[in-house]
Amino acid sequence: MNRQIVHREKLKWTNHSTRTDNGCEGDIFKMKRTISVLSAAVIFMSMLVMPANVSARETNGDKPWMNTKLSAEERVELLLDAMTLEQKIQ
């Protein structure tokens, strides 16, 4: 019987910290956990996308012939202008 009293007291303290005004238990904890998981997912996804954007900008800035918005003829001219004579011979 003493164990039941101790267990009830523990439940009172545990439930008190997560209880809202309407008496719903655990809703605040679930909401905080959901927000934490969603925040972690957003951060993780942004870290995956960010390096791709950076490398694309660096590639296009250093190599204008990689710009797919230009026509094939313009891209060929840019590439030939950037190549050395040795590269053209190979």
Image: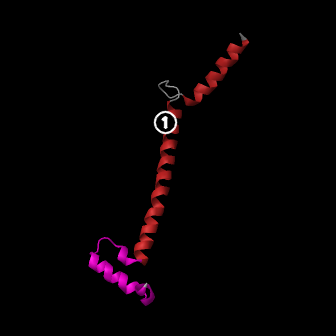
Classified by dominant secondary structure, the portion drawn in magenta counts as helix
Indicate the position of residue 47 as horizontal and vertical percent values. Answer: 50, 57
Vertical side of 71 occupied by 42: above or below = above
Where disc 1 sits, the SS reads helix
Q: Quadrant of residue 67?
A: bottom left
Residue behind mark 1: 31
Q: In which quarter of the image is residue 2?
A: top right
Front-lying residue, 39 or 60: 60
**Residue 33 falls within the magenta-colored stretch:** no
Q: In which quarter of the image is residue 75?
A: bottom left
Vertical side of 34 occupied by 87: above or below = below
Q: Residues within 10 Å of mark 1 (few under 14, many from 20)?
A: few
Residue that lies at the very extreme toward the bottom in this rendered image: 85
Numbered circles on residues, count: 1
Front-lying residue, 13 or 86: 86
Question: At 55% from the left edge and 30% from the top edge, which residue is drawn?
Answer: 18
Front-lying residue, 10 or 54: 54
Q: In which quarter of the image is the C terminus?
A: bottom left
Q: Is residue 75 left or right of residue 5?
A: left
Indicate the position of residue 1 as horizontal and vertical percent values. Answer: 71, 9
The amino acid at mark 1 is Met
Residue that lies at the very extreme toward the right in this rendered image: 2
Indicate the position of residue 17 as horizontal and vertical percent values. Answer: 58, 30
Question: At 67% from the left edge and 18% from the top edge, which residue is drawn?
Answer: 7
Report the span colored magenta: 63-89
Question: At 53% from the left edge and 29% from the top edge, which residue is drawn?
Answer: 26
**Residue 64 falls within the magenta-colored stretch:** yes
Question: At 36% from the left edge and 77% from the top edge, which residue is drawn?
Answer: 65
